[in-house]
Image (tube, rainbow, N blue to C red):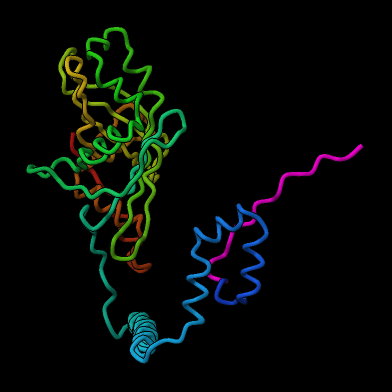
């Protein structure tokens, strides 16, 4: 009895190695299968190979040499600065927290584990400096145009009187939000984790509604409390014309006492920025001081 052939093992392509392969070898590789040929096309294999084989102009060669020289100089100067700090010749750099605007935020919306929309967003503080939020107007417009989030569109066209029956809880429990902050300066990343539906705030029947999502895992644990990310989605329901919208997404950070987890309190925006900067990475000589500063916080917003 003939044995059933096992499925092929997926072998990831390594585009950085294409420059070392010969023209004939790459051609034979492309002839192996239609699927592999498609992967090579997506990886721009021939373009990468051509970039290494085609002769460069004097201008391109001079530009590449200048880039290599600049990279070597920057690396050497960085080593000198670190050595100067270690030997006491210069004062170590103090920790300077970043601002929210110094980060780009990768946001993903999922429903039942399926990715509905993801993309990079830039946020801002409101006029009072109390809330950090992103506009979802463009993202929601794209989702509506592509009809990619039919579940949310249907939910926003229903009346908020359904709060009485708890129908909003049933649907939103299928939704989760994932947020990753990326510092523009060095691309250091801070995962704020997945956030799940927790509560709804707003008057029954009001078109403008607020939905609160909370993380199940802290971004930072200290001796006496944990710091937990939260998100607020502001929406407008429209059960008359069917034009409900996702308006904005707000990010917050809560302090949860280890002994009284239900007594959560919001951090001030500047404290949120401080934690983001700390998690993105600080100079090793300033790390302990920054941690002690966070551990010693007493004042949080209500």
What secondary structure is the stretch in magenta mostly built from?
loop
Residue nearest the observer in this picture, 215 or 67? 67
| Left or right of 38 in this view: 199 | left
Q: Give the image location of residue 88, x and y in percent.
A: 32, 83
Residue nearest the observer in this picture, 3 or 29? 29
Q: Give the image location of residue 282, x and y in percent.
A: 33, 63
Q: Quadrant of the C terminus?
A: top left
Q: Give the image location of residue 22, x and y in percent.
A: 62, 77
Magenta stretch, residue numbers: 1-17
Q: Which residue extends farthest right?
A: 1
Q: Give the image location of residue 132, x and y in percent.
A: 19, 43
Question: Which image quadrant is residue 254 in?
Answer: top left
Observer able to see residue 41: yes
Q: Residue at x 33, y 89 (%)?
A: 59
Instruction: Decide: is 232 above or below 168.
Output: below
Observer able to see residue 226: no
Q: Which residue extends farthest left?
A: 127
Q: Residue at x 50, y 80 (%)?
A: 52
Instruction: Decide: is 57 above or below 123.
Output: below
Count of numbered labels shown in the rendering: 0
Residue nearest the observer in this picture, 115 or 218? 115
Q: Residue at x 20, y 41 (%)?
A: 135
| Left or right of 112 in this view: 84 | left
Residue 248 within the segment the image draws in magenta: no
| Left or right of 157 in this view: 48 | right
Instruction: Decide: is 213 above or below 192.
Output: above
Question: Which image quadrant is residue 169 in?
Answer: top left
Q: Quadrant of the N terminus?
A: top right
Instruction: Decide: is 193 above or below 89.
Output: above
């Amino acid at each position: 009895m003939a044995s059933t052939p096992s499925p092929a093992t997926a072998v990831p392509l390594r585009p950085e190695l294409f420059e070392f392969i010969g023209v004939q070898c790459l051609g034979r590789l492309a002839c192996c299968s239609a699927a592999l040929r498609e992967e090579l096309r997506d990886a721009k294999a021939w373009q990468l190979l051509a970039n290494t084989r085609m002769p460069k102009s004097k201008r391109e060669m001079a530009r590449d040499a200048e880039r290599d020289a600049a990279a070597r100089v920057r690396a050497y100067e960085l080593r000198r600065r670190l050595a100067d700090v270690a030997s006491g010749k210069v004062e170590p750099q103090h920790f300077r927290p970043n601002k929210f605007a110094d980060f780009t935020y990768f946001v993903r919306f999922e429903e039942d584990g399926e990715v509905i929309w993801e993309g990079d967003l830039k946020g801002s503080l409101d006029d009072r400096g109390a809330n950090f939020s992103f506009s979802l107007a463009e993202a929601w417009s794209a989702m509506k145009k592509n009809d990619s989030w039919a579940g949310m569109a249907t939910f926003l066209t229903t009346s908020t009187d359904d709060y009485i029956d708890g129908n909003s809880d049933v649907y939103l429990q299928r939704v989760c939000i994932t947020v990753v902050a990326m510092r523009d300066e060095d691309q250091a990343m801070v995962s704020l984790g997945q956030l799940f539906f927790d509560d709804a705030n707003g008057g029954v029947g009001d078109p403008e509604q607020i939905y609160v999502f909370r993380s199940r895992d802290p971004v930072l644990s200290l001796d006496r409390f944990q710091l937990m990310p939260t998100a607020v989605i502001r929406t407008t329901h429209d059960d008359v014309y069917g034009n409900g919208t996702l308006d904005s997404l707000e990010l917050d950070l809560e302090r949860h006492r280890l002994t009284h987890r239900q007594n959560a309190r919001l951090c001030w925006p500047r404290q949120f920025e401080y934690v983001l900067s700390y998690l993105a990475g600080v100079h090793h000589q300033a790390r302990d001081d920054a941690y002690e500063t966070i551990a010693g916080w007493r004042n949080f917003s209500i």
